[in-house]
Image: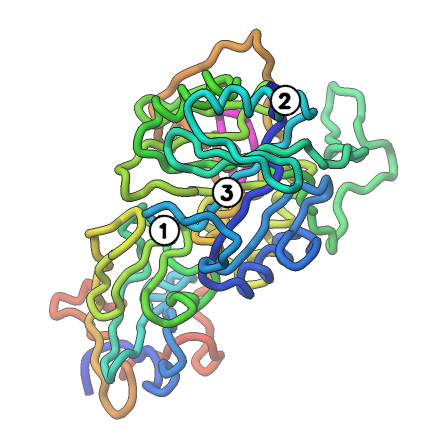
Amino acid sequence: MNIIGPELLIFGVDDVQACRQFALDYGLTASGDNRFVALDGTGIEVYAADDESLAAPLSTGSAIRKTVYGVKSQADIDAIKAELSKDREVTTLDDGSIEAFDDLGFLLGFMITQRKSLELEAEKVNAPGAVAQRGVNLTAVNKDDVGVPRSLSHVVYFVPDFPKAEAFYRDRLGFVTTDRFTHVGPFMRPAGTTDHHTLFFIQTPPHMQGIEHFTFHMGGPTDVMTAGTNMVNKGYQSFWGPGRHIFGSNWFWYFKSPFGCNMEFDADMDLHDDSWTAREAPPGADNSQVFLLQYREKWAPMGPPPPGAGGKPREAP
Amino acid sequence: MPDGIMLCALDELSNGALGFDPFNDGRDTVFAVFRNGEVYAYSDVCPHYGDTSLPWKKNAYLDSRGEHIVCAAHGALFTIDEGYCVSGPCRGESLTPVPVTVKNNTVWLITSPTGENKK
Ligand code: FES
Ligand SMILES: [Fe+2]
């Protein structure tokens, strides 16, 4: 089953207008009324939580309503349909895609991928001892550059039973576990990609089931920084980052969002094939970030603004 | 005059919630909501992670109908009057209330007798 990775995430949200603006500011492009896409055409769809075209939400109220995977060919659709039809209903939709629930109650879709193949360069780095990636007189940074999301990268779920989730995606859909956090959950990649993970599970009590975050791949760490800084400048609030993960090695910067989950920028993820042996580590800051650069609006020890400078509550007499 | 820190004029709260930085941390650490004639204030920390703030942008503490306080990170919903989490990851836990008082149409954060609540 050549599942490539997530193609579309479908949300039912409280504040559609805020989510639309957030998606645009994040760097996605509007494609029709509800869809916002990265450069390769993968992306998200945003609807009101009570939109009748959406499947019922999880009982927890999480805003994620459907996760649609892109596959290589119709043969893959047929194979997935044959496999899942063994023990559940699989519906074929008008557009030829299929949908079914996973073993935890998340609605999945599978479609022949429509992602465009991108011909772009990754961020180039120069270092002593290495052949220059960026030649002489080529500047890396321009003040106005803002990184643009290239491709939907991964989705992370809170789940009440990660062994059950892992077994379903492994045994029924051909995902491979690349690494795991002990007692928390596995990082998984489907057979059609070498990305370290397109899916990660976090074990939680049942009332927490839902989406934890989703993210798009950027062109490199500088794109993560410029896109994240652009978000900060627009008034959005960082949740975690910027930093670099250990498992997957991806750079990250998470922002809280009106989607009811975090939205991340990531870049430069490790690639793996079937010869890789999964690692395991206990969860925690030591093992999830190789470093963390906490964004601070005010960092220089300059003291408070002068009285009457505005923006700050005045102290009581 | 109470021994406290002025947060805002009461009418500034009429359109929902506001975040404040009363101790000059460089970010909002307290927020206040005006509802049914009362001002409710909480420390801007979500009990789910215990060290992250709630809104996705400044002052975005309420859902679109103004019915609940929201943590944007994972969508937790809290009652306005008690800060009690009714849905989401920290269901059953509560926001930490911050004592405030309204005097002369001004909202004050009350500093504690021992002073640890004071800058
Ligand atoms: S940190 Fe607030 S809901 Fe998760
Ligand atoms: Fe991530």
User: Residue A299: x and y, percent?
Assistant: 48, 56
Q: Is residue A66 visible?
A: yes
Disc number lying in front (2 or 3): 2
Please give the residue where the numbered disc 3 appears in the rendered image. A66
In terms of secondary structure, where does tag 3 sit?
Answer: strand
Residue identified by numbered label 2 = A76
Answer left or right for A129 relative to A11.
right
Q: Please, what secondary structure does the residue beneath circle 2 have? A: helix
Distance, label 3 to label 1, CA atoms, is 13 Å
Start and end of the magenta stretch?
A242-253
- Of residues A310 and B88, the one nearer the viewer is B88
Q: Residue furthest right?
A: A137
Q: Is residue A297 shown to the viewer in this render? A: no
> In the rendered structure, which amino acid carries the disc numbered 3?
Lys
Residue B9, image quadrant: bottom left
A244 vs A32: above or below = above
Mark 3 and ligand 2: say if the CB distance to the nearest ligand atom is below 8 Å.
no
Image location of residue A131, percent across then percent down: 80, 21
SS class, disc 1: loop
At which x and y percent is residue A55?
46, 48
Inspect the image, locate mark 2, and give the three-letter code of the amino acid beneath it.
Asp
Q: Which residue is mark 1?
A: A61
Q: Going by the image, does A286 lie left or right of A26?
A: left
Residue found at x 37% / y 70% = B20
Report how far apart the C-alphas of labels 1 and 2 lie in the structure. 31 Å
- Quarter of the rendering containing residue A69: top right
Q: Amino acid at mark 1?
A: Gly
Q: Residue at x 47, y 57 (%)?
A: A13
Q: Residues within 10 Å of mark 3 (few under 14, many from 20)?
A: many
